[in-house]
Amino acid sequence: MNKYKLEPQRSAEIYTITDENDFLNNVHGRFPFVQRTQCNVSYFAYCPFCLNPIQLVSYTGSVRAHGKHIGNGKKVLYFKWDYDRYKYCPYASHKPYVLIEDNERLENLVDNILYMYSLLKENFDKVKYVIEITLGMSFSKSFWKESIDLFLNSRAYMSPYLTERNLPYIFLYFAMQHQSIYGQIISENSIFFCALKDYADLDLTKVYSRQNTEYYKISGPKRYIELRLRLYDYKQQAVNGEDISESMVAAIDERISGKTLFEGRIILSADFFDNLVKKKDTFRDEKILEMASENIPVLKLR
């Protein structure tokens, strides 16, 4: 991998592995990141995904400098190993990608769960913004309330695949699965727009324009159309050991006729949400934050 953290925390900054001097400047040569013996000097940090210890290698060789998991059997001073985190890590996978298992939960990672739960509650307006930009759609307040209930009831905040960078996409995947999009607003730039526009039983009614983009309400001229959003095949992969790439397939089904109107893979931005959270001076949607505060209760863990 070419990324690392200096704290085993979801909130910790992610660094890129470049050269030895850069790493030493970041850690200031201090223990436990630099460990010396009579024979050599070793460099350690944390995996940005699973937060397990990694060793930084090949600073002086012909191979490009990179990080690799230390492994459960190797003891290194100060660092602790958690196999439950490791087995879900895309950087550790021997397969081309990690496919998300819907029912997997890690209930023992209390600190991680509390942080991600708090991140969702305190930044729900930004979670909403990322999802709506990704899909090219705008959803009603009642839609978001129902989505929050589905997310909490599924305990998806305990998913081992959840990180501080993919929170909106994991929320989308678990909370908006099979939700009805009838009556919602769609942008002409949405990946779904052409498929819905060409469907004879739908009537897309223009409702407003914003920044040279037109928005339409999804409705039917004669009858209610049961349009459902279907999401599957969520993949996480470390491309060439570098940054994590995530994607999922999104489909829109018309349940009554059994037709699939759209089906395609969405590539998810690795930095979009993280950058929004770090920008403290961005506009905040106070009404959405108030709604989230009312509908996301205090989390009580055993």
Image (cartoon, helix red, strand yellow):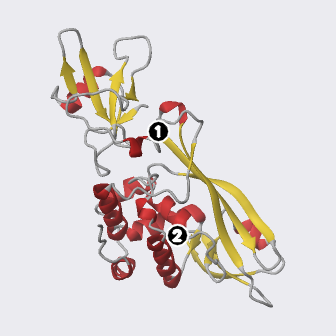
- Residue at numbered disc 1: 243
Foreground disc of the pair 2, 1: 2
- Can you give x and y, in whole percent of width and height, for residue 22 in the image? 27, 26
**Vertically, is 193 above or below 27?**
below
Identify which amino acid the numbered label 1 is placed on.
Asp
**Does residue 10 appear in this view?**
yes
**Vertically, is 195 above or below 247?**
below
Sequence-earlier tag: 2 or 1: 2
Q: Residues within 10 Å of mark 1 (few under 14, many from 20)?
A: some
**Vertically, is 243 above or below 216?**
above
Identify which amino acid the numbered label 2 is placed on.
Ala
User: In which quadrant of the rendered image does the N terminus lie?
Assistant: top left
User: In which quadrant of the rendered image does the C terminus lie?
Assistant: bottom left
Left or right of residue 295: residue 220: right
Q: Quadrant of residue 254?
A: bottom right
Q: Secondary structure at mark 1?
A: loop
**Vertically, is 15 above or below 139?**
above
- Can you give x and y, in whole percent of width and height, for residue 119 in the image? 33, 63
- Residue at numbered disc 2: 175
Residue 6 is marked as none
Q: Secondary structure at mark 2?
A: helix
Which residue is drawn at the image coordinates 81% and 73% (left, top)? 258
Q: Measure how far apart labels 2 and 1 are at the Cα level.
A: 26 Å
Which residue is drawn at the image coordinates 59% and 71% (left, top)? 137
Which residue is drawn at the image coordinates 40% and 46% (left, top)? 84
